[in-house]
Image: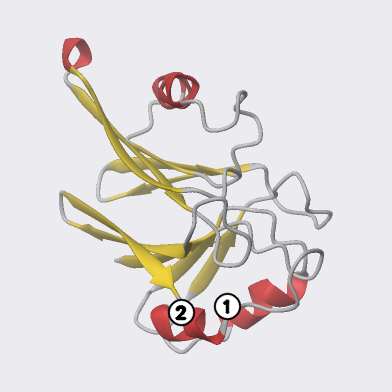
């Protein structure tokens, strides 16, 4: 299964619309995950209209007023995946606190946003014989990283393959 992951779009509170390139980058994905700070329901409708996309999974960010869950848990191919915006982690993006959140919720993967900075980080915990994968797609509209980004995430049998995608 191939996911497109996006976060922190801030449409229309900071930016007028999503870059057209995103629709092209996500044209082959099965599902899209939006990690919050959407700020406009229309964005979810637009993402859902991409050919081949069967579902848009979205969580509420600290700037969102729409009725969305704060966190979602999925299990795919035996991997337990958590999705949340990330505003419950303080300081913002703290890796140790995200690791503990994963351990408390028995997660293999945590997908979040909030920092506007892309991240693919594997954390190995030898004493538990466990690996945790932390993913953040950054932001395609208001990045704190010099480049605008989204992410693809492929789950194939027992293989996890995330990739940061640059938006021009």
Image quarter of the N terminus: bottom left
**Residue at point 31% right, 38% down?**
121
> Does residue 19 lie above or below 129 as drawn?
below
Q: At which x and y percent is residue 45? A: 67, 79
**Of residues 69 and 28, which is closer to you in this image?**
28
Q: Which numbered marker is on residue 59?
A: none
The image's mark for residue 47 is 1
Using the image as rendered, state which of residue 124 and residue 67 is in the foreground. Answer: 124
Spot the residue most to the front: 146
Numbered disc total: 2
Residue at 38% x, 32% y: name it.
Answer: 107
Q: Please state the horizontal and vertical placement of residue 50, each as a whole percent of the image.
A: 51, 86
Cα distance, mark 2 to mark 1?
8 Å
Classed neighbour count for the residue bearing mark 1: other residues with Cα under 10 Å, few (<14), some (14–19), many (≥20): many
- Tag 2 secondary structure: loop
Asked whether the beta carbons under mark 2 and mark 1 sit within 8 Å of each other, the answer is yes
Q: Secondary structure at mark 1?
A: helix
**Picture residue at 57% right of the left edge, 78% below the top:** 47
Q: Position of residue 60 (x, y in %)?
A: 70, 50
Compared across the picture, whether 117 is left or right of 9 comes to left
The residue at which mark 2 appears reads as: 53
Position above or below: 140 against 75: below
Near mark 2 (Cα within 10 A), the count class, few <14, some 14-19 or many ≥20, is some
66 displayed left or right of 91: right
Q: Quadrant of residue 120?
A: top left
Classify residue 123 as left or right of residue 137.
left
Describe residue 99's horizontal placement relative to residue 42 as left or right.
Answer: left
Q: Nearer the viewer, mark 2 or mark 1?
A: 1
**Residue at position x 63%, y 57% in the image:** 8
């Amino acid at each position: 299964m191939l996911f497109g992951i996006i976060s922190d779009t801030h449409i229309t509170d900071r930016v007028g619309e999503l870059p057209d390139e995103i629709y092209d980058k996500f044209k082959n994905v099965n599902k899209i995950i939006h990690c919050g700070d959407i700020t406009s329901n229309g964005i979810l409708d637009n993402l859902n209209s991409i050919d081949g996309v069967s579902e848009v999974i979205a969580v509420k960010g600290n700037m969102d007023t729409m009725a969305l869950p704060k966190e979602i848990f999925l299990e795919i191919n035996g991997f337990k995946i958590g999705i949340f915006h990330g505003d419950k982690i303080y300081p913002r993006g703290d890796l140790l606190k995200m690791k503990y959140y994963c351990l408390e919720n028995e997660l293999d993967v945590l997908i979040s946003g909030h920092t506007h900075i892309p991240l693919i980080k594997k954390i190995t915990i030898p004493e538990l014989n466990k690996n945790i994968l932390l993913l953040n797609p950054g932001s395609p509209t208001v990045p704190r990283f010099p480049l605008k980004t989204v992410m693809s995430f492929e789950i194939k049998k027992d293989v996890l393959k995330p990739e940061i995608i640059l938006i021009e």
